[in-house]
Image (tube, rainbow, N blue to C red):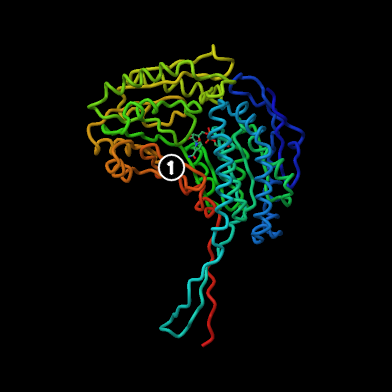
């Protein structure tokens, strides 16, 4: 299946890159070219920054809330009307299996967009802070706080669930009144360029929204991060690049918002309501484990460790022929995104064995599934939390199983990581709540609760990031506050 060419959207025009340069995008299922994308030059990036700056400084985009709201709603309607194209892009370009496409990739992205739009009327633009006296009561002031868009925002996004991340940033930023430049990962340009096309169709003023694609993973992002005309960078990706963005943004004191990696723990207590189900569903298979908030460490009680391993062995055996099928409607696991990612995951499988962990299931590449990048669902047992496979983000279909002694031990192990994105606790109600409160993470699911949704703030503690995306908080990330105090005549 071949997707239409992915083009830039700059200053209100959908166009090719300077000199018509393109690059090939390889599909994860086949390893073959699935589309060509515009390969932006530094001059193209420069033009997008200038356009976004102009649109912010010289139009009423940031101040005309009603007009902006109508345009964003029109954009939303066009996105929904193009659902089939979004589905095709998620499958072909991001390698999503059909079951994952109709969950995180497209449906959750669209639901999240709706949630942000529904929250818009709750955003406060002005707040009265009352009359107060100063200087020993000599002077009175009427004070208010005005909230306004921060300015030009650059959104730099990863390849794992591209539409979801793109919409989380773009819809929130546009609703807040920012003008934006979206820079997707080189592997997944179409999930961004389709938004450019639809913004044009929606009739956005030129420069309000721009999309830049480029084969070089760093060039465009670095230009955006270093440029003084860009006020904020909202980034989702690896912790390593997140740190680089902070560093590169420091000379211009850039506001940075970072959604980074994770190594989240799923704590199964010995009184979990359905122990077998809790253990079996801890398999890391959804979208081949390429999700930052997936719980990739499962913590099981020592007292039920052997029982847990038997359950997992059976669960993995039962899943053996349920993945890697492009046309299977119920499948939730396909390939990983690229050869580079496949090699990275396989190197961790090798490392885990060297570190002394035992492979309970999987562990091999599966070229028989197709010409793309297939790795078996893999489960390591007898893992100690200080092993690198328990500390580092693998971003593939790899679960590590770690035994613990008691609740305190489980909490200690769960928090013994540089990350702090998400987590799960399964157990009797009160006990599970107590454990959940002790986890140093931005979200926790208790007994199957859904802690990630478009109307809830999402983000991490520690090495998992700074700031919150989605929810009302996600829109407010793009705002500045200004105090206006007006003197009251004596
Ligand atoms: P990555 O960090 O390599 O790239 C992310 C984006 O940053 C891409 O668009 C890339 O082109 C760009 N980039 C690369 N170098 C840059 C630089 N020097 N300056 C500016 N931009 C630069 O991540 P990835 O490989 O695309 O995605 C996988 C990683 O993303 C995983 O670590 C995963 O955990 C993380 N992730 C986190 C979340 C979250 O919400 N916390 C969501 C999805 C993915």
Q: Is residue 73 left or right of residue 267?
A: right
Tell which residue pokes out farthest to the front in this image. 273
Give me the residue at 59% from left, 58% from top.
149
Q: Is residue 83 left or right of residue 108?
A: right
Q: 360 or 250, which is in the foreground?
A: 360
In the image, residue 328 above or below residue 103: above
Give me the residue at 51% from left, 22% from top.
342
In the image, residue 417 above or below residue 46: above
Q: 386 or 362, which is in the foreground?
A: 362
Q: Is residue 96 left or right of residue 17?
A: left
Quadrant containing the N terminus is top right
Q: Is residue 171 left or right of residue 265?
A: right
Looking at the picture, how far across and down is residue 300, in whole percent? Answer: 29, 29
Tell which residue pokes out farthest to the top in this image. 368
In the image, residue 306 above or below residue 184: above
Numbered disc 1: secondary structure: loop
Q: Quadrant of residue 165?
A: top right
Q: Which residue is mark 1?
A: 451
Q: How many marks?
A: 1
Give me the residue at 49% from left, 45% from top.
258
Q: 256 or 423, which is in the foreground?
A: 423
Q: 158 or 40, which is in the foreground?
A: 158
């Amino acid at each position: 299946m071949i997707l239409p060419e992915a083009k830039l959207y700059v200053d209100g025009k959908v166009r090719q890159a300077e000199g018509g340069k393109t690059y090939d995008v390889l599909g994860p299922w086949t390893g073959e070219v699935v589309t060509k994308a515009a390969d932006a030059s530094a001059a193209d990036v420069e033009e997008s920054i200038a356009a976004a700056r102009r649109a912010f400084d010289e139009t009423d985009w940031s101040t005309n809330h009603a007009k902006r709201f109508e345009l964003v709603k029109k954009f939303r309607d066009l996105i929904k009307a193009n659902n089939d194209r979004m589905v095709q892009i998620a499958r072909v370009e991001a390698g999503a299996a059909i079951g994952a496409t109709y969950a995180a990739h497209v449906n959750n992205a669209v639901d999240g967009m709706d949630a942000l739009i529904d929250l818009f009327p709750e955003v406060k633009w002005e707040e009265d802070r009352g009359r107060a006296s100063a200087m020993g009561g000599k002077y009175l002031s009427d004070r208010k706080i005005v909230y306004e868009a921060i300015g030009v925002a650059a959104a730099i996004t990863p390849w794992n669930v591209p539409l979801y991340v793109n919409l989380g940033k773009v819809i929130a930023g546009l609703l807040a009144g920012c003008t934006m430049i979206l820079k997707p990962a080189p592997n997944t340009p179409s999930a961004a360029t389709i938004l450019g096309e639809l913004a044009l169709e929606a009739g956005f003023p030129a420069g309000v929204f721009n999309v830049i694609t480029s084969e070089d993973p760093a060039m465009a992002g670095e230009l955006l991060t270093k440029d003084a005309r860009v006020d904020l960078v909202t980034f989702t990706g690896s912790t390593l690049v997140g740190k680089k963005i902070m560093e590169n943004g420091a000379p211009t004191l850039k506001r940075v918002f970072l959604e980074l990696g994770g190594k989240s723990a799923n704590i199964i207590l010995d009184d979990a309501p359905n122990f077998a189900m809790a253990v079996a569903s801890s398999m890391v298979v959804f979208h081949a484990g390429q999700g930052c908030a997936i719980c990739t460490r499962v913590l099981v009680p020592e007292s039920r460790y052997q029982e847990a391993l038997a359950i997992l062995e059976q669960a993995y055996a039962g899943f053996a022929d349920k993945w890697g099928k492009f046309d299977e409607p119920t499948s939730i696991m396909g390939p990983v995104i690229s050869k580079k990612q496949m090699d990275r995951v396989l190197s961790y499988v090798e490392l885990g064995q060297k570190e002394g962990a035992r492979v309970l299931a999987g562990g091999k590449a599966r070229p028989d599934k197709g010409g793309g990048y297939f790795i078996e669902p893999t489960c390591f047992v007898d893992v100690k939390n200080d092993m690198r496979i328990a500390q580092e983000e693998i971003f593939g279909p790899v679960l590590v199983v770690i035994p613990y002694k008691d609740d305190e031990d489980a909490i200690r192990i769960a928090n013994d990581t540089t990350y702090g994105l998400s987590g799960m606790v399964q157990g009797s109600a009160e006990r599970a709540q107590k454990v959940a409160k002790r986890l140093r993470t931005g979200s926790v699911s208790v007994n199957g609760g859904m802690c990630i949704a478009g109307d809830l703030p999402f983000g991490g503690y520690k090495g998992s990031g700074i700031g919150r995306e989605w929810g009302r908080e996600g829109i407010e990330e793009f705002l500045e506050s200004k105090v206006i105090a007006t003197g009251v005549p004596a």
